[in-house]
Amino acid sequence: MITMVTLIDLVLFTLLGITAIAMLRIRDLFAVVMLSGIYSLVSAVIFTDLDAVDVAFTEASVGAGISTILMLGTLALTSTKEKTPRRQSWGALLIVLVTGAALMYGTVDMPAFGDAASPINSPVTDRYIAASGEETGVPNIVTSVLASYRGYDTMGETTVIFTAAIAVLILLGSARTSDTPAPPRPATLRAMELRPILRAGAKLLIGPILLFAFYVQFHGDFGPGGGFQAGVIFAAGVILYALIFDMDRARALFRPTVTRPLIALGVLIYAGTGVATLFFGGNFLGYSAFNPHHPAHGQELGIFLVELGVGITVSNVMMTLFFTFCGRRRP
């Protein structure tokens, strides 16, 4: 007998598949971007249904939020129609088929969904669940694992975000930029007619969005969230203000001379926290060294600092990329 939870999962996965197929068949790139946002939102609902709320936070804020905005910015610089290739690339099709077959073959020996004997239910997981709260002083197990037990991995991910931002800035910086707005097109004029409605709605949203970003940042120890999600949410609030109200004013408030150094500062805070633990006689990113008499308090301090570094880097990367896209001229 199919339970209600299973039925909901089937409906969500079916909707996910329909969205993916539609993205493959549609040639209007604007519609594809919108569908990609829908795909991310449905994925976030699935993650929430699977009790992976932290992952759902990230998918909704990054996949449906920032990524959609950046892709729309890219379309504004290129075209909204996909170019039809002059000839079929059979070599590319062969590579895709071989890769897909290899991926499907790799899933043959995977454990069944919900199998209690699967590797995810290993003794390590049981130990995290049983002891992470006492060892780190952080009730949210996801935060304790990412920022403490897997601190090296998270620092690497933060460094990857920093490196990717530098690479994108190098590529975008090689093109011409312009501070003068382009002549309005009919679509722009139609959008401007809706500005009073957008302004009224944005006034109600921007303040709570920014406040919620701080809540996610400083409450990630106790509930879903953390520096990555908070950084993306904060950047989304700033970008919403720039799009609806005044691009120049937002750009003046968050100047590249401020945001770009902050990108590096976040990484330095993370790495510097690890170096500080060495001076206190501990291992790199061994936060217990901050308070040897109460190791859990030292863990709390270390997790707070590294999450702050992640939030600073992520928020300024997103804002810098957005304003850099907005400064480019349409070819």
Image (tube, helix red, strand yellow):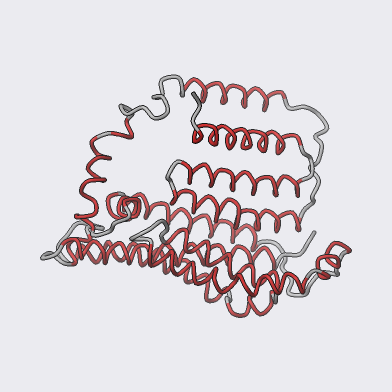
Q: Is residue 287 above or below residue 36?
A: below
- Nearest the camera: 260 or 20? 20
User: Where in the figure is residue 174, as x and y percent of width and height?
Assistant: 66, 61
User: Where in the figure is residue 177, as x and y percent of width and height?
Assistant: 71, 68
Residue that appears at 48% across and 56% down: 161
Quadrant showing the C terminus: bottom right
User: Where in the figure is residue 125, as x and y percent of width and height?
Assistant: 28, 40
Counting every numbered tag in the picture gives 0
User: Where in the figure is residue 162, as x and y percent of width and height?
Assistant: 48, 59
Q: Is residue 124 above or below residue 303?
A: above
Q: Is residue 188 left or right of residue 127?
A: right
Quadrant in the rendering for residue 268: bottom left
Quadrant in the rendering for residue 113: top left
Residue that appears at 59% across and 34% down: 11
Q: Is residue 188 above or below residue 54?
A: below
Q: Is residue 67 left or right of residue 187?
A: left
Q: Is residue 53 above or below residue 196?
A: above
Extreme-left residue of the structure: 293
Residue that appears at 81% across and 70% down: 192
Q: Is residue 126 left or right of residue 39?
A: left
